[in-house]
Image (spheres, rainbow, N blue to C red):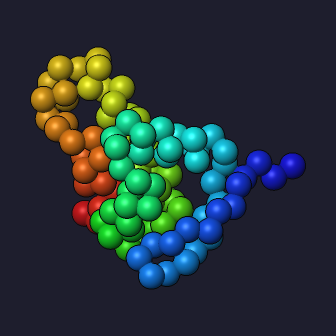
């Protein structure tokens, strides 16, 4: 059984399909709600700042993982909490090309 949900999204003036599991879509929606950002805007930020070697879907998965990792780390390590100021941009910096 295929446990992915395909959605067609618009990134700037281009339409593309993205295949993520329902859990991944939910995680992204929770980030958007928590950070008060539209999903389209978040995807555009990720697309603009991602490593060009990675596809958009992989970059979104990576962003989501890093965002949640940073969130957990901030709660258990005060030093990291001081270093991480903006959850979205801190995670985006981590997916950018080195």
Among all residues in the image, which is located at the extreme right? 1
- Residue 55, given in percent of the width and then of the height, sits at 49, 69
Which residue does the image show at 38% across and 66% down from the upper left? 44
Which residue does the image show at 25% across and 50% down from the upper left? 89
- Looking at the image, residue 95 sits to the left or right of residue 78; the answer is right
Q: Is residue 91 visible?
A: no
Q: Nearer the viewer, residue 54 or 36?
A: 36
Considering only vertical position in the picture, is 78 above or below 68?
above
Which residue does the image show at 66% across and 48% down from the upper left? 21
Q: Nearer the viewer, residue 36 or 14?
A: 36
- Residue 7, given in percent of the width and then of the height, sits at 65, 62
Q: Is residue 88 visible?
A: yes
The image quarter in which residue 96 lies: bottom left
- Residue 71, given in percent of the width and then of the height, sits at 33, 30
Among all residues in the image, which is located at the extreme bottom? 13
Considering only vertical position in the picture, is 83 above or below 37?
above
- Looking at the image, residue 20 sits to the left or right of residue 78; the answer is right
Considering only vertical position in the picture, is 9 above or below 58?
below
Considering only vertical position in the picture, is 4 above or below 34?
below
Q: Quadrant of the C terminus?
A: bottom left
The image quarter in which residue 16 lies: bottom right
- Looking at the image, residue 68 sits to the left or right of residue 23; the answer is left
Counting every numbered tag in the picture gives: 0
Which residue does the image show at 45% across and 82% down from the upper left? 13
Q: Nearer the viewer, residue 46 or 73?
A: 46
- Residue 75, given in percent of the width and then of the height, sits at 29, 20
């Amino acid at each position: 059984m295929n446990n992915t949900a395909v959605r067609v999204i618009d990134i700037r003036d281009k339409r593309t399909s993205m295949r993520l599991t329902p859990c991944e879509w939910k995680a992204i929606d929770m980030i958007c709600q928590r950070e008060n950002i539209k999903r389209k805007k978040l995807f555009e930020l990720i697309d603009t700042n991602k490593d060009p070697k990675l596809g958009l879907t992989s970059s979104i998965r990576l962003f989501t993982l890093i965002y949640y990792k940073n969130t957990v780390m901030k709660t258990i390590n005060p030093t990291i909490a001081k270093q991480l100021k903006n959850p979205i941009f801190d995670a985006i910096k981590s997916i950018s090309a080195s």
